[in-house]
Image (tube, rainbow, N blue to C red):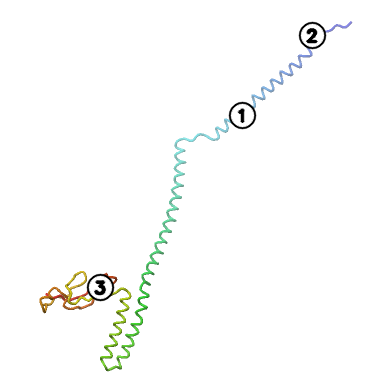
């Protein structure tokens, strides 16, 4: 008759329990190792970007400001160059306008010049002084009309009271009558107005 060992079941279960404990210990060890690895990675990442000191931050700010100043300086130089070119171009255009402003007037004066040249040529063979006189008078009238068309008018000041706003006294002379004292006795050089503004004072002799 065979005897049943009362401890046989316990003996069979023991290796299984030990294996389970080993698994649990191994899993715990792996978890601990993984946690340590994660902690080490976090520590490594933290150490890879160290916190800047105040001096280092100031240096970085200074470098940034230097870059900004350099960019602004370049912009200023470009703007200055553009303005200088604009100023030169404007001055050139203004000079050209001034040089060409009187072109139309001068073109209108050319026919008068033609008349004067013809008069000089013809006067060499004309013996009648009256013909010459009439020719010069016509030229003068033509030129006066041209001046009037440009807004230029001659002053007619003989016998008028002396006015320093329009007249320049060259000399004084005894007035032939009492009512001519302080008035223009003679005109040495005619004065001219352009659009009612003096462009040349009349040079006159004033009675005293």
* 29 left or right of 146 in image: right
Q: Say whether disc 3 or disc 2 marks the residue closer to the N-terminus.
A: 2
Residue neighbourhood size for the residue with mark 3, other residues' Cα within 10 Å, grouped as few (<14), some (14–19), many (≥20): some
Q: CA distance from mark 1 to mark 3?
A: 101 Å
- Give the residue drawn at x 30%, y 76%: 148
* Viewer-side label of 3, 2: 3
Residue neighbourhood size for the residue with mark 1, other residues' Cα within 10 Å, grouped as few (<14), some (14–19), many (≥20): few
Across and down, in percent, residue 200 comes to 25, 73
**In the depicted structure, whether residue 68 falls above or below residue 53:** below
Q: Which mark is residue 7?
A: 2
Q: Residue furthest left?
A: 178
Across and down, in percent, residue 157 comes to 20, 75
* 63 left or right of 37 in image: left
Pick the front one: 125 or 182: 182
- Give the residue drawn at x 44%, y 45%: 65
Q: Quadrant of the N terminus?
A: top right
- From the image, tell me which residue sits under label 3: 200
- From the image, tell me which residue sits under label 1: 38
Across and down, in percent, residue 69 comes to 43, 48
């Amino acid at each position: 008759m065979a005897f049943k060992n009362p401890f046989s079941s316990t003996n069979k279960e023991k290796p299984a329990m030990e294996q389970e404990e080993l698994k649990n210990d191994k899993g715990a060890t792996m978890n601990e190792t993984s946690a340590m690895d994660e902690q080490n990675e976090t520590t490594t990442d933290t150490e890879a970007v160290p916190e800047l000191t105040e001096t280092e931050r100031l240096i970085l700010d200074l470098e940034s400001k230097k870059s900004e100043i350099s960019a602004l300086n370049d912009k200023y130089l470009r703007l200055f160059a553009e303005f200088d070119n604009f100023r030169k171009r404007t001055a050139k255009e203004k000079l050209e306008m001034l040089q060409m402003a009187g072109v139309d007037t001068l073109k209108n004066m050319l026919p008068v010049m033609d008349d004067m040249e013809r008069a000089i040529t013809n006067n060499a063979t004309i013996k009648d002084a009256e013909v010459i006189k009439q020719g010069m008078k016509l030229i003068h009238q033509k030129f006066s009309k041209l001046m009037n068309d440009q807004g230029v008018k001659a002053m007619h000041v003989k016998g008028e009271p002396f006015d320093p706003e329009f007249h320049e006294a060259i000399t004084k002379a005894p007035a032939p009558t009492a009512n001519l004292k302080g008035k223009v006795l003679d005109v040495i050089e005619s004065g001219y107005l352009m659009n009612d503004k003096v462009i040349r004072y009349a040079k006159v002799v004033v009675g005293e």
